[in-house]
Image (tube, rainbow, N blue to C red):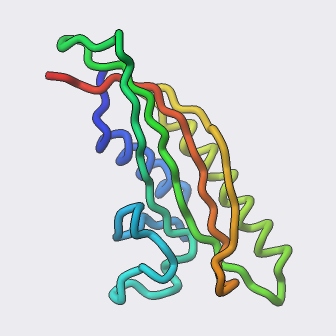
Amino acid sequence: MSTTFAELRQDISTEIAAIGGAWNASPVPFALHGPDDVPDAVPRSKAHLSFAIGLESLGSDDRQKLANGAHTTTIATVRFFARFTPADGITSEDAGLDAEHALIKAVVATATDFQILWSSSTRSMVSTGEWFVHEVAFTAYHRLPLQ
């Protein structure tokens, strides 16, 4: 079965939203997703565990047939924010790490028409010190429809 880029992004988004709790998809695209870029219509509290998904893809030179689709490798990067509370810094850091682990488990379980593997995670803090920024990368192997 073939999977488009939009379907892949939507499948990952659905699995993350199903984790429960405060997880919510960002109303802005990945390139604009930042704690300061959340639109005015969205309360600042919604930035906590808000996520966006960015995709980078590479096709295979020798595996492209109209009937079967193109064998594709897509790196799906999920960026999310976890609130940092200075009064309880280690606890808030651990909560962000637990959220990251829950995200990894949910996304790896996503694969139905494609294979997806956890690749890497990076963590940083925004300059204001209010948010942890987590970026979790996954590698998806799927067929892109050509018909």
Taking 93 as reference, is 57 left or right? left
Q: Which residue shows up at 34% across the image and 22% down it?
A: 143
Identify the image quadrant of residue 128: bottom right
Q: Where is residue 6 drawn, in percent x and y?
A: 29, 44
Count of numbered circles in the view? 0
Taking 40 as reference, is 36 left or right? right
Residue 128 higher or lower than 105, as above or below: below
Q: Which residue shows up at 26% across the image and 18% down it?
A: 69
> In what quadrant of the picture does the N terminus appear?
top left
> In what quadrant of the picture does the C terminus appear?
top left
Identify the image quadrant of residue 21: bottom right
Q: Where is residue 110 drawn, in percent x and y?
A: 49, 37
Q: Where is residue 83 drawn, in percent x and y?
A: 65, 78
Task: Find the residue positioned furthest to the front.
Answer: 61
Taking 9 as reference, is 129 left or right? right
Residue 49 higher or lower than 97, as above or below: below
Residues 59 and 53: in front is 59
Q: Where is residue 82 drawn, in percent x and y?
A: 64, 72
Q: Which residue shows up at 59% across the image and 70% down it?
A: 81
Residues 137 and 15: in front is 137
Residues 14 and 35: in front is 35
